[in-house]
Amino acid sequence: MSERSHRASSRDRILGRIRAAVADAPAAPEAARDYLESHTPHDPAALLDLLHENLADYRAHVHRASEAEVPALIARLLAGRGARSVAVPDGLPPAWLAAADVERRTDEVPLTPYELDATDAVVTGCALAIAETGTIVLDAGPGQGRRALTLVPDLHICVVRAPDQIVASVPQAMPRLDPTRPLTWISGPSATSDIELDRVEGVHGPRTLEVVLLQGQPRRL
């Protein structure tokens, strides 16, 4: 018997024993859905403040701006971090980078890992943001790009439209997300800690997360 056949045979025996053991077990009960959907009043201003607070608590740098102020703000953030190149996902509003004096690297022909590693920053939108957890969700939609764009460059500037893209809680977020899309959940910059709780940022993704809370009506593109 080959090694592969032996592994398959062992697996089949184990699964067979499990099926036999639970054959007479009662059906699993329906999951309880009586929990609160949110712990926050439905108030757009309160949600915006809560999201701001929790993003900052996770060590993201948070800014508020109107549509007209976004280009100058992004240019200032890029310059302040010394960024000379920026990855530009397909569908990003061109005006957001109109004031920035940087090299723009599009991903129409996918940037290689080496090219992304040599890129200083990425600017994206998002799918939505969750106020109670301080979480931003990306789904690779327009203006967000594929996951690697937001994992490799050291600086991520993410624009969240308020109030349209802000929900209070995870239960409210789930119906608005497509589970077949590649979802990335971001709570602050990438970080890890060793056994002595020494925090190191930038290990699994961007070292710096700048979040722009864009207030006002979305612009037609």
Image (cartoon, helix red, strand yellow):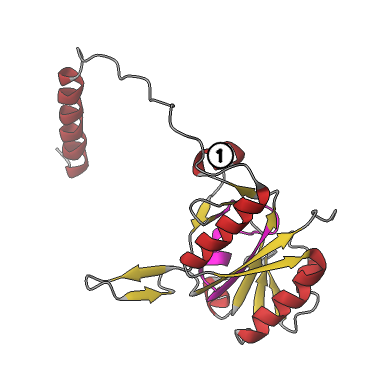
Q: Residue 89, percent across and down?
A: 68, 64
Q: Residue at x 63, y 55 (%)?
A: 48
Residue nearest the observer in this picture, 96 or 108:
96
Q: Residue 12, percent across and down?
A: 20, 29
Magenta highlight range: 136-160
Residue nearest the observer in this picture, 164 or 122:
164
Q: Residue at x 47, y 65 (%)?
A: 57
Q: Crowdedness of circle 1 by 10 Å Cα count: few (<14), some, many (20+)?
A: some
Q: Is residue 63 above or below residue 28?
A: below
Q: Residue 80, percent across and down?
A: 63, 85
In which quadrant of the rendered image does the N terminus lie? top left
Left-right relation of 33 to 74: left
Residue 15: image quadrant is top left
In which quadrant of the rendered image does the C terminus lie? bottom right
Q: Looking at the picture, which amino acid does disc 1 mark?
A: Gln
> How many numbered discs?
1
